[in-house]
Image (tube, rainbow, N blue to C red):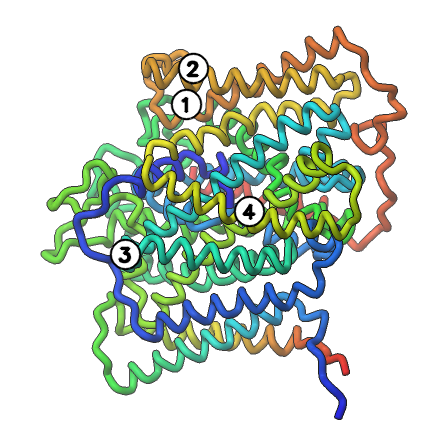
Amino acid sequence: MRSVRMPRNIPIWFFVGVLLTIYGALIGGHGVYAWVTHERSVVVLSNLHAAVWWGGMILILGLIYCAKFFPRRQQ
Amino acid sequence: MILAPNAGIASKLFLVAVAAPPPVHGQLAHLTPLDVSVIAIYFAMVLFIGFYLRQASNTGEQFFLAGREMTAWIAGLSFVSANMGSLELMGWAGSAYQYGILATHWYWIGAIPAMLFLGLVMMPFYYVSKTHSVPGYLKLRFGESSRIVAAFSFAIEMILMSGVNMFSMAVVMKVVLGWNITFSILMSSLAVAVYVGLGGLRSAIYNEVLQFVLIWAGALLVPILGLVEAGGWHKMVAKIASNYRGQDYVHLWRDTGHFSANPMGVHWTGIVFGLGFVISFGYWTTDFLVVQRVLAARNLRAAQMAPIIGSFFKMAVPFIVILPGLLGLVVLKNPNGTLLHLVGQNQVSALHPHSFNEVLPLMMVRYLGPGLLGLGITALMAGFMSGMAGNVSAFATVWTYDIYQPLIRKRATDSHYVAVGRWATVLGVVVSIGAAYLVMHAAGIMDYVQALFSFFIAPLLGAILMGMFWKRATAAGGFWGLLLGILSSVSLFVWVRLDPSALSIVAISPDAKSMAENLYRALWSFLISIAITVVVSMFTQPRPVAELDGLVYGVTKLPFQEPVPWYHNQWFWAAIVVVVFAGLNILFW
């Protein structure tokens, strides 16, 4: 079986994409959960559900960066 | 991030604030498991990047200059990000709360013209000379003596500032989250030592780009929600005028015709010539921490474009730093609904439990729920760590090439110097930890650490400008101009400390406030540096013109640059920056 080595040219934008995707999923996901379960919030303007749309935006941006800057694998 | 004069004054206030006795209130924020996860994931990512880039940091060029492979965008973003640390974010938000929109000057006139000048005029010389550092350029132009003065000054201030950064971050984490100071210091320094020691400048730059994105992702939501709550910009301005009668917080230039007419106590001449020229040019064109990022660009055009790209983002930073400070004047309320008033650190009491510099964390806690708060805190921590990493990576380069190589071991293999650089990184972090604990036990030292930077930057600008643009400048002229310029700045500082009334002479007005001191001291020390360089040069022997190729404007053959479409041309984009810059200053006149 051929071993697959780490690509040597992963651009920084791919790392940015991965991080934003993870954060967007976590924050947006929790925001949706909190909205659906009517979780009590102590922050001001909680009725705007900022975690949902901000998390969603970060997730979309992250996915775009991951797709655009996906590194080629070296085999 | 080094505490640049670009943000030096507010940062100085912030540093004095965080060094004072702990606040009377409990911690500001309580993290949920989601918030902790967000922070932990960030640490995992930066360490992974360091390990991943180890394989690409084996030569001197790779370790100290990231292989000179960075694109204009990456070099440009790290150029801005290396300067935009959390100390600045919090310090300037606090300054905006205290002094209003005038704080924006440090981001606009205090940065943009200098960044354009660096990109369009100075980068060809830094790049063509193939120097590893700014002290390295001084050595090529004026000889070893000037390099040694610059190198030791850089090395000492970088490490001290890294320690100050580290301590300030630890205090902020204690105030905001209740974290133990030693835990914060060790956690952040270990992470920085690992990812910079392994991956060198490339790792530092990658993490600065990451930090830049995180700062916007974590902090941008605060002014957006703040404007929603305030009812928009115009309603915010009306409420500020109503809440703070007699003080103008929302005009950039209108009230700078007299020291006593504005909250900051400055005059437009100090802003334009002291800040806009001497301090900002001195920092953005000569400070090795930021110049190193541009030197890592892959070709001359990318090196010239990088500061221009950075300038667009620099102009946008007030939206996430200054605007939250202004919004704090309107939206921060006590539990009983009355307006919350923040005060100076030495005025914090049970009646007024929060200081100016807590405005950004207070705004974050006000609007950011679980997850988002963790992202905001991560943005602050990323800012602090990138500042430390920037200082440490710059220190490792200056130590290796400007101190170790010329003074200790002149001839060694490239791999030897890379090893020295890795150990210098570790040494730099260890000394920074020591500096952090020194500052913890002697708060007053921070005042002098910050002043150390300001002593140096204006005279250095004088030396660099004379070296780059006047072929008659001699080695002796450059050295004495630099040294006596530094001594004059120290003398003015000491004079005002010993006799506060001397400020009226230094700033040429009895109405000048302490904020004006830095601006005018920089101006005078710069002029003295220039004058000494000219006088000494006229009495000493210049180098033959043929030896100045690559070092001086007018005798340097710049590399031919292939014509490119107008949308890739650096002059076109610089013109756009000028138009936007002018428009913003008119809009907020």
Tag nearer the camera, 2 or 4: 4
| Residue farthest bottom in this picture | A1
Q: Do the residues at pointers 1 and 3 share their chain?
A: yes
Q: Of the residues under marks 1 and 2, which one precedes in the sequence?
A: 2
Residue nearer the viewer, B53 or B328: B53
Q: Which residue is mark 1?
A: B517
| Above or below B243: residue B509 | above
| Above or below B496: residue B566 | below
Crowd rating for badge 4 (residues with CA inside 10 Å; few <14, some 14–19, many 20+): some
Q: Chain of mark 4?
A: B
- Whole-percent x, y for residue B15 in the image: 36, 39
Q: Of the residues under marks 3 and 4, which one precedes in the sequence?
A: 3
Q: How many marks?
A: 4
Q: Which residue is mark 2?
A: B506
Q: Chain of mark 3?
A: B
Q: Do the residues at pointers 3 and 4 share their chain?
A: yes
